[in-house]
Amino acid sequence: MSLENSLIELAYSIRLAVRPMLGLEASRRSAGKASSGDESFQIDRVAEQVVSDFISKHKLPVAYYSEDRGLVEHGRSKYVLVIDPIDGTRPAMAGFEQCVVSIALAPYRPNACLDDVSFACILELKQDRLITAAKGGKVTIREGRSTSTPCLSTNTDLRSMAWTYEIAGRPSELVTRALAPLIDLSSLCGGVFIVNSIAYSMTRLITGQLSACVDVGNRIVRDYPSTRDQFIKAGLGSVIGLFPYDIAGAVLVAEAAGCVVTDAYGKPLGGTPLLDTSEDSIQSCVAASNPVLHGLILEAIEAGMNALSSV
């Protein structure tokens, strides 16, 4: 079995273990802090254990970096997996569908970055949909026994844009003020959603259900350092945002599908360190189904960021 197929099998193993826990009260029990400082729950711990057991059982020649455990090495590994066993833990605990397994494969070296990801798979936990992509290759969408290709939205009008933004662990007042121009333009004729899973949101661009997804949290704290205390308060003691494990798989599949993905300044994310969840490596994101819409979103974000100048 190829390494890529082993990763797909790992994703299905995680889903098999946690699917019965979706929506159950027991899945909500706090399990302390993840290595990144984010909150961890019982359902996360079950998923993390599957990762460890699977890699050991199948003797995969990989180190791995996961949300809860950080970097785990296995001898002289040639590759590293960057894994978010459940991206969308909060929807998973509520029994909603916006939760996925996200796995990215890259050569193992200390300075590995997002551009080094060579393969990614994203598996939905509640629905039977698997999305895979290899660097330089095409995106494959599998649903049961059928396969399909990406179907990106051609919408270029902010007013009819369906999109998501991230707010978990971010100060809601600052985020909504920064995004107010976009929210007001699109809330009636398009749609504004909070799903708390960047990987799920990016894959909805691939299926054509959304036109964009946005996270401006890290741009706010970078542009206005005086807001850091508000971020720490919202993050229950840590600055929370998009960590490398959140986006490692999603960026590859979205870009391979033809989406435009940058940070909230419009700069590429490729240089993001894969194995670092320190505050310096937290990212912002603007992903859109086409370049025109991406540019319009960035313009609206600039206007919203200027509105925060009084904070």
Image (cartoon, rainbow, N blue to C red):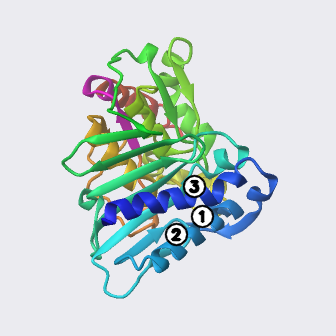
CB-based contact (under 8 Å), mark 1 and mark 2: yes
The Cα atoms of the two marked residues, 2 and 3, are separated by: 11 Å
Q: Which residue is mark 3?
A: 15
Q: Which residues are magenta?
A: 285-294
* Outermost top residue: 189
Are the two marked residues, 2 and 3, in contact with CB atoms closer than 8 angstroms? no
Q: Amino acid at mark 1?
A: Ala
In primary-sequence order, the first of circles 1 and 3 is: 3
Amino acid under disc 3: Arg
Question: What is the x, y in percent for residue 258?
Answer: 26, 34
- How far is disc 1 from disc 3 in space, using C-alphas? 8 Å
Tell me which residue sits at (48%, 44%) in the image. Answer: 198
Amino acid type of the residue tagged 2 in the rendering: Val
Q: Pick whichever, 93 or 222, lies toward us.
A: 93
Q: Is residue 287 above or below residue 24?
A: above
Point out which mark residue 51 bears. Answer: 2
Q: Which mark is residue 47?
A: 1
- Which residue reaches farthest front? 145
Distance Cα–Cα, label 1 vs label 2? 7 Å
Q: Quadrant of the N terminus?
A: bottom left
